[in-house]
Structure formats: structure tokens, C-alpha cells
Amino acid sequence: MSGLRIGFESPLYLLLLAILPILWWTSFRSLAGLGPVRRYLSLFLRSTVVAGVILALAGIQWVRTSDRLTVVYLLDQSESIPVAKRQLMLDYVVKSVANHRQSNRDDKAGLIVFGREASIEVPPFDDEIRLSRIEGYLGRTDATNLEAALKLAQASMPSDTSRRIVILSDGNENLGNASQLASRLAESGIGIDVIPVPLNSDAEVLVEKIDLPSDIRQGQPFEARIVVNNYSAEGSNASVQGRLRVTQSLGGDEQLLSEEEISLAPGKNVFPLRHTIDQPAPYTYRAEFIPATAADDSLRQNNQATAYTYVRGQGRVLLIEDWAKPGQFDLMIDRLRQSEIEVVVQPSNQLFRSLPELQAYDAVILAGVPRVSGESADAISSFSDEQVDMLVRNTQQLGCGLLMIGGPDALGNGGWADTKIEAAMPVDFRIRNTKAQAVGALAMIMHASEMAQGNYWQKVIAQNALEALGPADYCGVLHWEMQGDAWLWGGNNGLLTVGPNRRAMLAALSRMTPGDMPQFDPAMRMAIKGLNGTSASLKHCIIISDGDPSDPMPGTIQAFKDNSITISTVAVATHGPAESNRLRQIAQATGGKYYQAQNAQALPKIFQREARRVARPLNFEPEGGIVPQIALAHPIVEGLGSSLPRTRGFVMTEVKSSPLVQTLVLSPQPESPENATILAVWNYGLGRTAVLTTDAGSRWADEWTHWDGYDKFFSQLVRWLMRPTGDTGKFSLATKAEDGRIEVVVTALDNDDEFLNFLDVAASALSPDLQPVPLQLRQTAPGRYVGSIEADRAGSYFINVVPRPGEAPLTTGVTVPFSEEFRVRESNNALLAALAQTRPTGGEPGLLTEPLTNDAFAKLLETDTFRPGLSLARSVRDAWPFFIFSVCCLFFADCAVRRISIDFGRIANAVSKWRGKADATEGQTQARLESLRAQKEKLTDSIDRRRTSARYQPDPERPVDVADVLGKGDTAGTTERPTSRQSSLAPEQEVKSYTERLLEAKRRAQKQPRDDKNS
């Protein structure tokens, strides 16, 4: 049911309507000359114009009311609610809408699900909700944000209906503030019903924390405390039996510290653990409770807690070497150990897996290692993007040193270009100087793959290979279409430089659909022509296929060999030895590599490795070698003289254009100094990074192995890079995780135990996903500096604090074992009741129903969520623009009525003429005009006859005034009676008109006073 009425935004302006009678009274007499019809019409129009202006000033509106209702259900999907309860909630919504929505009233129903975020599962619409499960929510479920759900519900409901929100939740919100938002919803007329979702708290065990001392020292025993909480049913004194298991993790190794049977009394239970740390390193402790009976514990997510501690000792260095070429840096490792630097060697196929593992080291060395290593498809290993990010964050945010040492497969040759590692180094791995630029060319022949998602993986691997190329390198892709073999870009030439075309190339690869190539030879001949058409110094071709196409011609293979073009082949989903052998023979004949990929995940690594072949020109190996020169005084090269021993080569790089970069050692060749760097360093974030572009003696710098300064050079280089170590003085670092935040407290004392004030304490933090978290410490008391970060997800948070420049950093980790969702095991009935009791404007408070259980399900369906009790919806639309437009039109009409007199007879005649009809009055009018013309002519003739027949006849009784006849000057004062002679000679006097006689009388009257005056 709906209705339309008029409303006003400013009704006081309606008092101005009182001027209308005054307007009629003043205008009635002034318009008297218009005639009665025009007079009253003008008054009506003038009054309407004034009334319209007054209504517009009052803000006239069209107001439509409606009793339609929109109900939006909010379903809590947080992890604190069991899956079975979530399904029961959805079933209730579906049946409630089906039972109570009034289709004849066009009621609408919608569904919103929420956890940490909120999303619309079903937008409000006028039909039933038909869902068997929740499908649309992809957000995190480790928190409850009821406020976000209420905001989304308000925004999604139409304003032209009454509105009600039905909440199905346990009320345990840990993000937002639903109570404050509920009052604003009530002001908008939105009602809130609440259906509590009870939680089973009869049996629940929660491992709250592991409490570790903040000042653990190497070799010093300490006591840790494990806090376990037994949530028993109210009034129950039953204990829970189970096992408490405590482990210690260092890197990837886990050690069992204790495992014992325990009995948990209701409430909090504390269990001590004595332990001693013998080796300085970062350690993670984990305590886990395993109940003897599953019924004694309803949730397993909160059954474990972790703690992190870092025991600092002397400096430790992690050296990562190429697992395919072990032992190349053994001499350098031995010399560092002789210099009392502890070195841990890690092959590139057994890399670290987490940031805590890197925290054990004060510097990391990438010793001649490429990003992708290995020769066969199954043995290829690589640094993942996550591991690269860990290395960079460990330096930038946590102050660890990072050193890259060159080699034939390192730096730009090793596939490190365009990575975060390159951004952290003082040099770029790509050469932009055209004189020294190393140019390669890569052609890829793509054959349709029959493996699962084969064409998708071909796109991925082609994109990876393209991204590994430099801006001056050439790249082309050959694929088969219905018309035959064709280049994916570049026209007939096929190969284009990557730099200006990289983005367009990637877009073309995403649209590529390789066909089933019938033979290799045409595509391979096109590849030869395209590669030879470039100026690249190194040319390479990659073929990916299942081996079905026919063999290439011997002349084609010979052309590849004659032009020094190598071919690597990748066999995927081959149908037998024949196809595999065909690809193997192509690779072996041209000096390339053959790979047989059984797993699609290995394909990108293969192509990354093969793309490195075109980067080999970055190796600078002049004949006779070069003698590096020390270009800048620095602690690293202190005491080494002016030059280093001869080296036969290095990897060319380009120094970053930053004043922070310090180039310590340069090569006299090539001519461009920015590409002749041997050693460069800079500060990166809280840490330091360095690049040594030659090796440590295995290939190029073999003369260094006999150099007396070998030990000094590498030990000074590594020590300068290392994170400051040693005693942290009287600075202490404490952390506390509570209410979704981690509080960091630093206490600063001097050697006399006096507070250190006004320090500029530098601090940084990393979240579990290795993203930097803003952390700022402010002084809150003498010697006390406090800051906090948000901890909105489970995992390890790493804190690094540098109290003063040059001081050893304070490093720790805080582990959030589980979400706050699992800490509270009872419904927040107080919040739910407060939401339901909120009274909307013009309506009634909502309902707080019984808790949603299987037993109460049928009774809850009797509650009509589409019941009345809310203020009718009003849709308001401003009408004053329409009134203003109408007033303007009527004003011109009023002016026209008063200023324009319309001859309706003439209009009728014009219409008649236009229609071609005779004018009935035209003859009469013409006859009347002829009669008037005749009368005028007759009168004119009569006047003329009278004028010509008139004669002058003097009056015998009246004397003649000679002055009248002859003039005043000649006969002044003479009066003479005319003689008969004179009378006969006098002209005939004309008969004068009435007007002429008046004019003569006037002249005589004017003349008489002058005569009197003269006399």
C-alpha cells in the first residue's frame, strides 16, 4: 500500500500567501482598461505566479509513503561458530523468508555473511532465498566484525521501503563497535532483531601462552611457564586429562623438550619448564595440549601456543652456494672461520623456509649462486619469490647484512635482474650503457601441449623467460595457426627488442593459443632467419613440444650450427621414446640442453634457466685480465694498498645513481666507469649490502688465493656487513600480545643505572607475511619507550630495535598462535540484547529470540521477521524545480495578456482564407467602403461650388474699414463708405470656414492690444 502527498521543507514561507488578497485589490482597478475577460485572466495568472514562487521558497516536495519491507539477514561466519551451526543458520534464513515474506506487498529479502570482512551473498530482491550453502564469502574468518556487516546492510537496503536487520551471531565481536553504529541505524528508522547462536562451553581447553624470560643468556638455565586454561561448565569441578608436549625449533629442526601426562583443574593451570640454551640462535618454543578424550575439548585450533626468543652470541654468517657446483668457495669459508667468523654453508636446493631461520645470522652471502640451478627437469631448484622477499626484509627491516659475490652464473647472469634482490644492491644487474650493453636474442617455438592445462603453462613459462631478458635483448615467439607457422609479434622479422615492447609482448602472450604443429622445419627456418636478422652477440632457441611434428631437415640443423645458434628442447607429454629422441637429438646436435618435464610446475624454472643463456655477454673477460684499483678509502679496503691482485674477469653491472652508493674498487676496463665496478657498498634500510662482481678465486680471481691480503679483505668485508653484535648494554626489550595488538617496551639505562632519556629509538617490525608494520616508540616515562603494532593474524611478528646508532640491535619475535576468535567460548548476550533493544525512529524495538538450536528451530520460525512495527518508508522528491519552471512560463503568459490585444475576427478570417472559404462579410465591408467614398466625394463637390459662387456684398448699415481692405498703413483712421464704382471693382469674397473665422478672430484679439499700446 502506498500514497502520495505534498510536503514542505520550509513551511513558514507559506505565510507569504497572505499577500494574494492584497495583490487582487491593488491590481483590480489598474487592469480596468483590459476588458472583463483579459482583466480576470491577468489577475488569475498573476496570482498563480506569486503562489508558485512562494511554494518554491517553502521547498515543496512530493512525498510517497509505502508499507513495503526489506529484511536483510546477517550470518556470522567466524571460526568461533562450528560448521554445523553455520548451516543451521542458513537453513533458518531460507525457511523464514519462505514463510513470512509477503509477495503481494513486494517485500524484499537479502543475505550478508561476515567474518573479519563482510560481503553480500544475496542482494535484497523480491523473491525467496534459495541457497543450500554459502558460496560467495572469500574473506578471512579469524575475526568477528559485526560493525562492518551492519554498515554493509544499511548501504544495501533500498530507502523506499521499511527496513529491518536480523542478526544471527554469538556476539563475540573483536573488531569494530556495533553498539555505536546501532544508534545511528535507529535514527535512520532501521529495526534490529537478534537470534543468538549459542556456543558449547561445557568442555574447552585453551593453551594461553608460553612465558619466556626476556633476558635469556647463553649457557644460563632459565624457567619457562606454560599457561593452560580449562573452561569447564558452570558448577562443574571435573578435571580434564591429557598430555602436554613442548618442543624447541631451530631453523627447520625440531627438538622435543618434554612430554608428560597432566590433569587440568577448572580454571588456569601453570606448568614450569626448566631449560638451558647452549648455542646462540633464534628459537621457537611450542606447547601443545592433547586431550585424552575428544569430548573434553571442542576446538583444536586453540590447543597450542608458541613463543620466540633470540639468544645472541658472536657473529654468524650464512653462505648460500650453488648446489650443482659445490666447493667453489671453500677457501674463503676456511679463511673466514680462521678469522673467528662462524660460517654456515647452505646449498641452494636446501634453502631456508622462514624468516626466523635467517634471524640466526648476522649476514647472508649469495656466493656465485644463480636464482635457478640444475641441469635436468627434475633436479632444477630455484629461489622462490617468498624466499627472495625474506632475504630483502631481513636486511631492510631487521638489519642483517647481504653480500653477493660474482661468477659466470651470478648477478645478471644468474637471473637476478628485475628482482627485489637487485633493488637492494648498490648496482643494477642490467646494462643501459649502449657501448657496454650485452645483447642476446631468444626465439621460442611453442607447440600445443597435451598435458593438463598445457597451453596455460606455455603462457606462464614464456612470460617467465621474457621477464628474464634485458631491455636490449631480442625476443620472439613462433606458434602454429591454421594458416601455418607465424610469429606472435614483429611481422616477418619476428624478433623485437624487449625494452620498449615488454608490456605489449606480455599482453600478446596472454592471448596466445598454440596449435598442433605438423612439422618442425618451417618454424625452425623462420627462427634462423629472425635470429640472424638481429645484432645480438648470443642467440638461442627454445622448443617446447610433445615431439609429434616431423623431423627438421639436416640442412636446417646445419644452419643452426653454422650460425652458432643453440637449441634447447623441452619434452612435455610425449607419446613414446621416438618423440623424446627426436627432441633430444635436436638439442644435442646444436649444443643445447634437453629436458623432459613430468611436472608442469617445473616448466617455468626450465625456461628461466634457459633464458639466462642470452645473458652470458655480461661476463667481461678481457685478454690478459685486469688489475682492480682501489677508488675510495673505506674500512673494508683499509691496509690493502692501492690495488688488488689481477683477475681474469668479472660480471658487468651498472652503478645506481644514488649518493649513498660507495664504489670502492674499480676496473680500468671497460671505458665506462659505471660498468667497471668490482666492489660497491651502501646502506639499505637498517642493514648493509655489497656486491663483489668477481669471484673468490675459483675461476677469475685465482691469483687472489696466493695474496697475503686475501684473509684481511674478505674478513673486513664480511665484518662491515654484519649486524652489530656483542653486549646490548643495559637496554631491555619486552613485548606483550593482547587484544589484537602487540605492545613493545624498551627500558634504557646507562652504566650507572641512570635512565637514558630523549633517545631517538629506531624500531621496525615485520608481519607474518613479511610486510613491514609501522612501529614508532615514544618515551612515556624516564628511560621507558613504548610502541605498539596491530596483530590481526596468527603467526610470528619480528621486532627489531636499535636504541642508539652503533649499538647492537635488540631483536625478538612475538608469535600469535591463534585468533582471538578462539579465546572466548561464551556468547556475548549483553551486546546482543543491547542491539535488539534499540528503538528505531517511529517504530518499535526489535526482538531478542531464543538461542538458535535444533530443538528451538521450529519455534523460531514462528517469529515473523516481516511483521509491521516500523515507520512507513517515505520517498521524498523535490518539486520546486517544476514549480519554478511553471512560474516562468505563466509570467510570460501574464505579460502577453496585458500587452497584446487579439482581434479574433481577423484571426477567423485568416483561418478561413487559409482553408480556401469565401468571407461572408467581405462584400458587406466593400459596399460600406464604397458608400463612404461616394459620400465624401459628394460633400467635397458641394464645398467647392459654394466657394466659387460666393461674392463680397458690403453691408450698407456698417461702414467699411479701409484698413481691412487696403491695409492699416495707407488708411489709418479713415472711414469711408464705398462707392458703387469701388463695389463693382471689389473681388468676390470667399466663404470662410468656421476654423478660418476663429483664426481671424484670434489675430484681431492679438492685434488690438498692440494698437492700444502704440496709441
Image (spheres, rainbow, N blue to C red):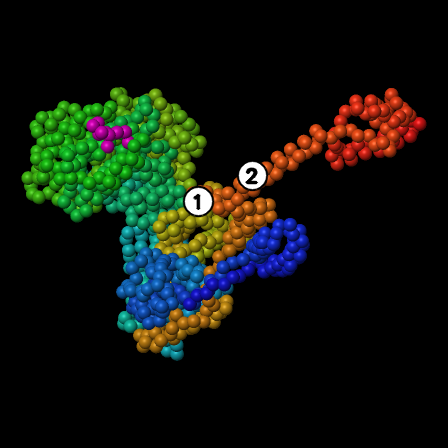
For the C terminus, the image quarter is: top right
Hey, what amino acid is under mark 2? Glu
Q: Position of residue 88 (x, y in %)?
A: 31, 69
Asked whether, in this view, residue 54 is left or right of residue 118, the answer is: right
Q: Which residue is mark 1?
A: 917
Residue 930 marker:
2
Hey, what amino acid is under mark 1? Lys
The residue sitting at 40% across, 56% down in the picture is: 792
Q: Position of residue 277 (x, y in %)?
A: 35, 54
Asked whether, in this view, residue 326 is left or right of residue 913, the answer is: left
Residue 831 marker:
none
Under circle 1, the secondary element is loop
Examine the residues drawn in magenta and state their main secondary structure: loop
Q: Is 494 a magenta residue?
A: yes
The residue sitting at 38% across, 73% down in the picture is: 864
Q: 234 or 909, which lies in front?
A: 909
Q: 989 or 723, which lies in front?
A: 989
Q: Quadrant of residue 92?
A: bottom left
Asked if residue 713 shows in the view, the reply is no
Q: What range is drawn magenta here? A: 489-498
Number of residue marks = 2
The residue sitting at 60% across, 45% down in the picture is: 899
Asked if residue 970 shows in the view, the reply is yes
Which one is closest to the eye, mark 2 or mark 1?
A: 2
